[in-house]
Amino acid sequence: MNLTLDLQQASQQPNLPSEAQVTGWLEAALAGRLDSAEISVRIVEEAESQELNGQYRGKDSPTNVLSFPFELPPGVPAEEMNFLLGDLVICAAVVASEAAQQNKDLYHHWAHMLIHGALHLLGFDHIESVEAEQMEQMERDILAGLDISDPYKGEF
């Protein structure tokens, strides 16, 4: 897997993951699915996350991860742009708060959120229960390969 990462850290939160960690987690998510990809990851504060969540999802609150798959401009052949996967926007404060509330290792939760977002960029979703089960199992499998326990364990 050949990943080109544009990492933008627009957050002052402590304990943000390193570029190497982000790259490793995304490569794990994409392994066997793509040969190469380009992804932008922007780590933001709550205000930016809330603004984007309101604008694109109609929800007036910050959220853990937003995924924006790349859309090919009209008239551009797909083979010229197939490596551009899209953008992930992750709210550091929400990720940290969720990790604490759920008694999860902070970096394991970061890994989960990046993998979850990458799967969305690949077109996977969790709106329908069957899709949710499939996506959650993919997340479990990828995380297990990184020696990270099931993030859904204990949820009903």
Image (cartoon, rainbow, N blue to C red):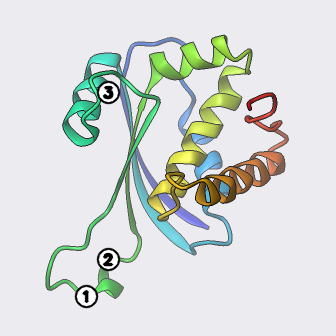
Q: Is residue 152 visible?
A: yes
Say if mark 2 contacts mark 1, CB within 8 Å.
yes
Looking at the rendered structure, the kind of residue marked 2 is Met
Where the C terminus falls, by quadrant? top right
Q: Position of residue 8 (x, y in %)?
A: 36, 35
Camera-side residue of 153 and 42: 153
Q: Residue at x 65, y 48 (%)?
A: 24
Secondary-structure class at tag 2: helix
The nearer-to-camera label among 3 and 1 is 3
In the rendered structure, the answer to whether residue 87 lies left or right of residue 58 reads right
Camera-side residue of 155 and 96: 155
- Label placed on residue 49: 3
Which residue was labeled with disc 2? 81
Q: Position of residue 82 (x, y in %)?
A: 38, 77
Question: Does label 3 or label 2 sit earlier along the sequence?
Answer: 3
Q: CA distance from mark 2 to mark 1?
A: 7 Å
Q: CA distance from mark 3 to mark 1?
A: 32 Å
Q: Residue at x 29, y 33 (%)?
A: 53
Camera-side residue of 50 and 154: 154
Looking at the rendered structure, the kind of residue marked 1 is Pro
Which residue was labeled with disc 1? 77
Q: Quadrant of residue 128?
A: bottom right
In the rendered structure, the answer to whether residue 93 lies left or right of residue 139 reads left
Looking at the rendered structure, the kind of residue marked 3 is Ser
Question: Does label 3 or label 1 sit earlier along the sequence?
Answer: 3
Camera-side residue of 64 and 31: 64
Q: Quadrant of residue 135?
A: bottom right
